[in-house]
Amino acid sequence: MTRITWNIVDVMPFRAVALGTVLSLISTQLPAQDFAKGFTALQAGEYQLAFKELRPLAELGDPYAQYNLGGMYYNGNGTPQDYAEAAKWWLLAAEQGNNLAQSILGRMYAAGQGVSQDNSEAVKWSQLAAEQGNAQAQTHLGFMYDKGEGVPQNYVEAVKWYQLASEQGNAQAQVNLGFMYDKGKGVLQDNVIAHMWYNIGSAKGQEIGGTNRDKIAKEMTSADISKAQSMARECMSSNYKNCGY
């Protein structure tokens, strides 16, 4: 069996913040209509206009404009691609508590993309975002504890973060949580629960989940497989509230 390892491309390209969310939170000292114009242009693929509108707001200190501008530099939309510049703007947003920027910044430090590779910084930013409920950051933090990168290896802590992300529907976390149950790392070994999480991750598009599920099924009875399948259906239909434990 294998777990999902982390690569920066697994979590990029950046996704713009939902407009309604931003406009409800943006500072009243900044021209919200300019952000709306820039964001709408960004969504429409009018990148030069988006860059023109968002850059001044980012320079004024708005974290949502900074977050979106970082994404434009990362993808080379409306400006030459520049990972260091992307990291600069995401850092400014992250320092203001933007969990989306914190989450991405954590993965950039882990990969050494746009910044010097630094697992301690990766953990720091992932932890801040994870504590705000960011499922990608929770998954990444779980992986850092799982592998002992930037923190002492701690399978119990890894399971904790994988669990939180899995209950938000993160398929990568679901497969990795299945792996922990499969191997009895940080939890009691349980083929049924491992099969359940592998199956759920597979249903959400993670091919490795299906591969692992089929392998572990060879070690299970037909009754246990049926039970695991039923648990997976109940878990998904309950929006991860009833997952067999």
Image (tube, rainbow, N blue to C red):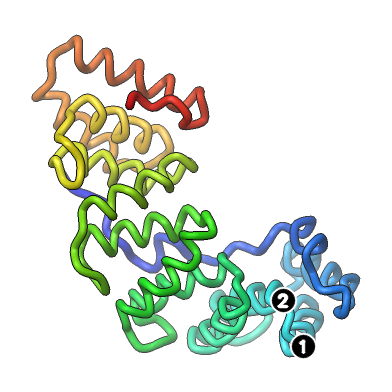
Residue of label 1: 60
Placement of 191 over or under 201, stated as above or below: above
Whether residue 218 is visible, yes or no, is: yes
Label disc, if present, on residue 65 of the rendered structure: 2
Label 2 vs label 1, nearer the camera: 1
Q: Are marks 2 and 1 in contact (CB under 8 Å)?
A: yes
CA–CA distance in space, label 2 to label 1: 9 Å
Query: Where on the picture, by quarter, is residue 212?
Result: top left
Q: Which of 54 and 186 is in front in this view?
A: 186
Q: Residue furthest left?
A: 219
Point 33% across, 49% down: residue: 160
Query: Where on the picture, by quarter, is residue 151?
Result: bottom left
- Three-letter amino acid code at the position of disc 1: Leu
Q: In which quarter of the image is the N terminus?
A: top left
Residue 145, how many percent across, how many down? 26, 61
Q: Is mark 2 on a helix, strand or loop?
A: helix
Point 72% across, 85% down: residue: 61
Q: Is mark 1 on a helix, strand or loop?
A: loop
- Asked whether, in this view, residue 47 is left or right of residue 139, the answer is right
Residue 211, how many percent across, how many down? 22, 37
